């Protein structure tokens, strides 16, 4: 989030939520663990926050399509599925995984962590990487603009057409950075502590549009704000693509093993399957340039 970002139930997305039942038994949230990525990464050798348990952090509420029913432990939603898939690659069964609540901006703040890794649409940025370690990216994300259908800016075809829009966005997110650095509206955006507050502002027409990550935008339009639409999607960066990474304490001894787990899931096609299952319709929004 990116963030501070399914519709499967509503039919608009293969999953939606501003995000998991794993795709197969290799990393099943039902508890089938695959062998450890390497001998050095066997679960008995990992330095964990809580002995014998893999502790995973995320925020509450946990929104779709990243999670489902505000329950990260149920294995449903993109990030729940990814988390259990990584756990499986590290050798953990479902009953050996426990979840803890961590506020979005607390996850990447400096200092000791009470989780082994956190999964919460946290975009990898150089500034954040000064305070925490990130895994290799598990999802490449774009930002999206959502407005009320029929509103003044709902028909915008370019970022330039949004210059005069009053935009709402969550604090501490790459969405906020994208508003300031890419859209560059003439008026300062309305900044909210939580994503749901930005959504409520749009619903109450206190802002002309909001900016969230693309999968979240599909959920907003399908389930949260009636008669809203995705104006379009855009990249938050001019160079390397924006990616979500699993967050770990700075200097975490787990980083190399978590990286190997993510690489293994990519090479086996598991990440692609999970993405298609839960975020499959996210490519359908028009591009804004």
Image: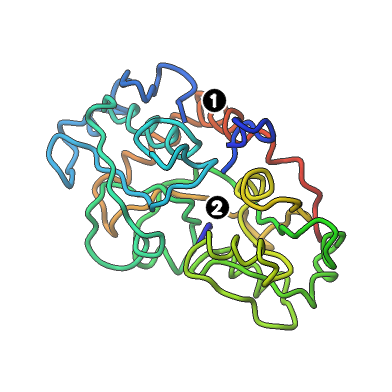
- Tell me what residue is drawn at x 66 percent, y 56 percent: 143
Query: What crowding class fits label 2: few (fewer than 14 Cα within 10 Å), some (14-19), or many (20 or more)?
Result: many
- Could you say which quadrant of the image residue 13 lies in? top right
Q: What residue occupies the far left of the structure in this picture?
A: 51
Q: Is residue 80 left or right of residue 287?
A: left
Q: Nearer the viewer, residue 106 or 252?
A: 106
Relative vertical location of residue 277 with respect to residue 133 in this rendering, above or below: above
- Tell me what residue is drawn at x 45 percent, y 69 percent: 127
Q: Which mark is residue 79?
A: none
Q: Is residue 83 left or right of residue 68?
A: left
Q: Which mark is residue 5?
A: 2
- Could you say which quadrant of the image residue 51 lies in? top left
Mark 1: secondary structure? loop
Asked if residue 168 shows in the view, the reply is: yes
* Residue at which label 1 appears: 269
Q: Position of residue 257 (x, y in %)?
A: 31, 39
Mark 2 or mark 1: whose residue is earlier in sequence = 2
Asked if residue 1 shows in the view, the reply is: no
- Tell me what residue is drawn at x 47 percent, y 55 percent: 122
Inter-mark Cα distance, 2 to 1: 23 Å
Quadrant (top left/top right/bottom left/bottom right) for the C terminus: bottom right
Q: Position of residue 83 (x, y in %)?
A: 39, 37
Q: Position of residue 200 (x, y in %)?
A: 59, 62
Q: Position of residue 190 (x, y in %)?
A: 61, 76
Total count of labels: 2
Tell us which disc is closer to us: 2 or 1.
2
Q: What residue occupies the far bottom of the structure in this picture?
A: 187
Relative vertical location of residue 248 with respect to residue 65 in this rendering, above or below: below
Mark 2: secondary structure? loop
């Amino acid at each position: 989030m990116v963030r501070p970002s399914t519709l499967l139930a509503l039919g608009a997305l293969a999953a939606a939520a501003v995000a998991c039942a794993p795709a197969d038994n290799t990393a099943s949230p039902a508890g089938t663990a695959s062998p450890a990525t390497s001998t050095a990464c066997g679960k008995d050798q990992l330095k964990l926050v809580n002995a014998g348990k893999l502790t995973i952090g995320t925020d509450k509420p946990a929104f779709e399509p990243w999670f489902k029913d505000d329950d990260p432990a149920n294995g449903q939603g993109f990030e729940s599925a990814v988390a259990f898939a990584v756990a499986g690659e590290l050798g953990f069964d479902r009953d050996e995984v426990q979840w803890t609540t961590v506020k979005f901006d607390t996850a990447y703040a400096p200092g000791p962590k009470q989780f082994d890794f956190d999964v919460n649409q946290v975009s990898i940025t150089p500034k954040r990487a000064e305070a925490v370690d990130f895994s290799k990216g598990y999802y490449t994300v774009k930002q999206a603009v959502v407005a009320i259908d029929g509103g003044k800016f709902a028909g915008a075809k370019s970022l330039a057409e949004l210059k005069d829009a009053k935009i709402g966005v969550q604090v501490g997110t790459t969405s906020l950075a994208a508003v300031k650095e890419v859209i560059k509206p003439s008026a300062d955006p309305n900044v909210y502590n939580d994503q749901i507050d930005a959504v409520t502002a749009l619903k109450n027409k206190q802002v002309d549009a909001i900016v969230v990550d693309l999968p979240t935008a599909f959920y907003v339009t399908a389930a949260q704000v009636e008669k809203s639409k995705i104006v379009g999607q855009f990249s938050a960066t001019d160079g390397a693509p924006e990616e979500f990474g699993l967050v770990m304490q700075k200097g975490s001894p787990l980083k190399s093993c978590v990286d190997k787990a993510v690489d293994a899931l990519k090479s086996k096609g598991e990440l692609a399957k999970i993405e298609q299952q839960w975020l499959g319709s996210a490519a359908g929004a028009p591009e804004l340039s």
